[in-house]
Image (cartoon, helix red, strand yellow):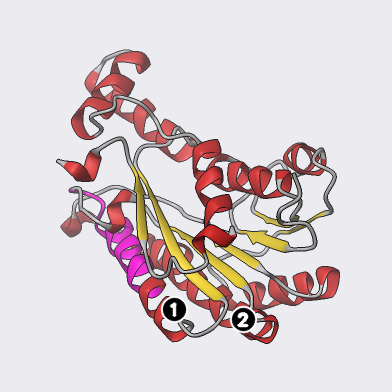
């Protein structure tokens, strides 16, 4: 399929996990991809390029506005601009509020929230000039509800949902839409770290820690997959979603239905 042929998507945090899953699904529809992220680049780049699209990588540190500006300029130079912006980059740290390290708070707000503001403000001029664009913010179920010991993450993800709504309202009379996707548990490296830590802390096996994690929050007892989130992103880029604006779409196995 080539429903997005000729479009360029920039997906932050796309060398693994949710971001890579979304990048692959957008590439499957014909979109060229600008990847961003740390770690192994060549293997995920090959996975995306296998769909016959052009792929470039920029290693911007999403906590640094100047590097974000350089990444957006890179995308404009390589592809003429960003048509689909997926703000996915994120980090996590868990601790009670009184014990939360200040530097961890600052880093989480910078990467999980402020980076989306910077990419969005830089992407809008190109999108409005073409009168077509899609801004997709990967929030979280924690953009809708809270969990203890995640003050910075919950604050950032609630902020992402709010930023999405404001962006959608400001662009409401244009062909540019902004929406958020709010996953529940997805088995990403971040979540695996939490499972491993839980297993060690409670002296149980990883399989039991996984079951316990899911049963606490997610009635479906299933992880949401990066491929499913990629499918939601593809839908939000489709003509059927042209008037879907400012929504926070949960894909959470029933978490927020309780």
Cα separation, mark 1 vs mark 2, equals 13 Å
Is residue 151 inside the magenta stretch? yes
Residue beneath disc 2: 122
Quarter of the rendering containing residue 156: bottom left
Q: Quadrant of the C terminus?
A: top left
Query: Is residue 179 in view from this perspective?
Result: yes
Highlighted magenta segment, given as a residue range: 148-163
Res 101 quadrant in image: bottom left
Q: Could you classify mark 2 by the number of other residues whose Cα lies within 10 Å: few (under 14), some (14-19), or many (20 or more)?
A: some
**Viewport quadrant of the N terminus:** top right
160 vs 40: above or below: below
Q: Nearer the viewer, residue 142 or 31?
A: 31
Q: Is residue 192 left or right of residue 144?
A: right
Q: Residue 167 carries which label?
A: 1
| Residue 12 position in % (x across, y down) | 60, 58
- Image coords of residue 110 (percent x, y): 45, 69
Q: In this view, does 52 lie to the left or right of 103?
A: right
Q: Is residue 188 above or below residue 68?
A: above
- Image-based side of 200 in relation to 11, left or right: left
Q: Which of marks 1 and 2 is in front?
A: 1
Label 2 sits on a secondary structure element that is helix
């Amino acid at each position: 399929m080539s429903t997005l042929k000729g479009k360029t998507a920039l997906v932050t945090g796309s060398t693994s996990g949710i971001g890579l899953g979304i990048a692959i699904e957008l590439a499957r529809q014909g979109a060229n991809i600008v990847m961003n992220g740390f770690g192994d680049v060549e293997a995920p780049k090959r996975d995306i390029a296998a769909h016959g699209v052009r792929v470039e990588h920029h290693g911007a540190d999403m906590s640094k506005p100047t590097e974000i500006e350089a990444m957006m300029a890179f995308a404009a130079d390589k592809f003429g601009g960003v048509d689909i912006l997926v703000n996915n980059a994120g980090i996590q740290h868990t601790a009670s509020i009184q014990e939360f390290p200040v530097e961890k708070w600052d880093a989480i707000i910078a990467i999980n929230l402020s980076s989306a503001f910077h990419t969005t403000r830089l992407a809008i001029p190109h999108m409005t000039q073409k009168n077509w664009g899609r801004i997709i913010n990967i929030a979280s179920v924690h953009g809708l509800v809270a969990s203890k010991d995640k003050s910075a993450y919950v604050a950032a993800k609630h902020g992402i949902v709010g930023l999405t709504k404001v962006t959608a309202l400001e662009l409401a009379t244009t062909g540019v839409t902004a929406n958020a996707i709010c996953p529940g548990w997805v088995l990403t490296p971040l979540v695996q770290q939490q499972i491993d830590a839980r297993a060690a802390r409670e002296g149980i096996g990883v399989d039991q820690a996984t079951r316990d994690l899911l049963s606490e929050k997610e009635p479906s007892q299933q992880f949401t997959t990066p491929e499913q989130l990629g499918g939601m992103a593809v839908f939000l880029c489709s003509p059927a979603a042209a008037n879907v604006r400012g929504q926070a779409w949960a894909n959470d196995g029933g978490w927020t239905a309780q």
